[in-house]
Amino acid sequence: DVFVLSRATLLVGTLTSQIGRMASGLRLAAGGGEPRAIALDINNMQSVAGMGAADGIPHPSGEGWRAPPVGDEEPDAEVLGIEGEWLTAIRAVQSDCSLPAKQVNIPSDIDGDFPAQMWRLVSAVVAVLRGGQSFTVAGHFEGHSNTKDCREAVGAKVYDEVGSFSCFFSAERRCNVTRPSERSVAGEDVGMPSAAAVKKLRAVPDEAKAAFFHAVETYLFRLNQVTMSGTLKRKWLVRLDGDERGWLLGVDAEPRSLLPSSAKESKPAGELAKRVVAWASAQHVSAPAVGSKAPKPKECIMYLAANSSGIVKKVKQELDKKSINNCSLKVLGIQLWWDDHPGLKKQVRSRAAGDVLFDLYRALGWR
């Protein structure tokens, strides 16, 4: 712990903990420069200094400790895609605490079908924004966030009175003071002038309705830090975090949609394999220069998003390590990884919901 903390870009701790103080001092002694060290108990500095003075321990101010930042200085959550004009306008409206806010409820009549729940929510939010109001989200994603884990994550009061949207996603309105983890920014003029943004959202032209819908979808789908850490961990677990230079093929192998259950059957593994081979074979690959050796095949990743590992195993048998057009395929899937590590599978909180979010955000959303 001391070793890792001493090499941290940002060190957050307390002055009453000797671990953090030792780590900060080691960084200075090793010539790493003054660390960014935040003391959550900065008010204890003088008393801590007094306690250590008799033993010859230096004053903690010489270790680079600073007070916690004042105000909401945390950068906004990462979005999937680019910051377009509609997303900028949505941010402006949601950041203006003087605007009236209408509560939008997560649909409760769709149990376990996360994409359908999200799209219904997006549709309701679109209507509110086009009416010139900001919005707040209430309720639960049935089968995903109405869990003991999410209740603990957001707090019992917020869970019972507001809902569990914030279990997975960043706050939909920055000035929502009902959530204890946020600070009110009421009265501040944040971002694009809200009057201009409201006018813009009220007049979305027909040709831009689809773009606006997806901008709302993107705004809502800003993973909070805990959920983002879960997606990054999954990315590392299945080895999507390598230095591969070939293709990344994302396959939605098992439809999860508004279709009736009878229409949600996955495509046969053989058909998926056949289509991937046909696509890969048709891609242009530059011929090697005259007299030079053929280039070493690149490792190309095929990631299968699915509810279970069955389809992943079948496609892996068909395509794994198959060379196509200077590309050596590697078939991956988070469900297959969990099968190989059943002990960890049982320990991960809200695992099923996290897997769906990972499939949406990291795997199928890349390229």
Image (cartoon, rainbow, N blue to C red):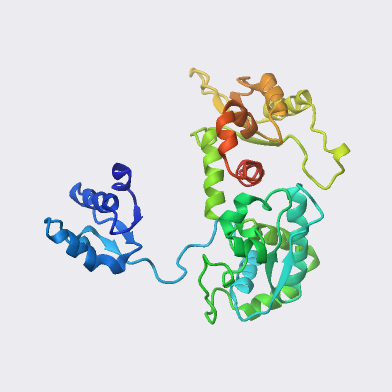
Residue at the spot 32% in from the left edge and 47% down from the top edge: 5
- Percent across and percent down for residue 279 are 71, 30
- Percent across and percent down for residue 322 are 63, 19
Residue at the spot 68% in from the left edge and 24% down from the top edge: 313
Q: Using the image, determine if residue 171 lies above or below residue 189.
A: above
Residue 203 visible in the displayed image: no
Residue 55 visible in the displayed image: yes
40 relative position to 62: left or right: right
Residue at the spot 77% in from the left edge and 42% down from the top edge: 256
| Relative depth, front residue between 64 and 199 | 64
Residue at the spot 23% in from the left edge and 53% down from the top edge: 33
- Percent across and percent down for residue 168 are 61, 54
| Relative depth, front residue between 77 and 353 | 353
| Relative depth, front residue between 217 and 178 | 178
Q: Specify the quadrant that holds the N terminus.
A: top left
- Percent across and percent down for residue 27 are 24, 49
44 relative position to 199: left or right: left
22 relative position to 81: left or right: left
- Give the total number of marks visible in the rendering: 0
Q: Specify the quadrant that holds the C terminus.
A: top right
Residue 202 picture quarter: bottom right
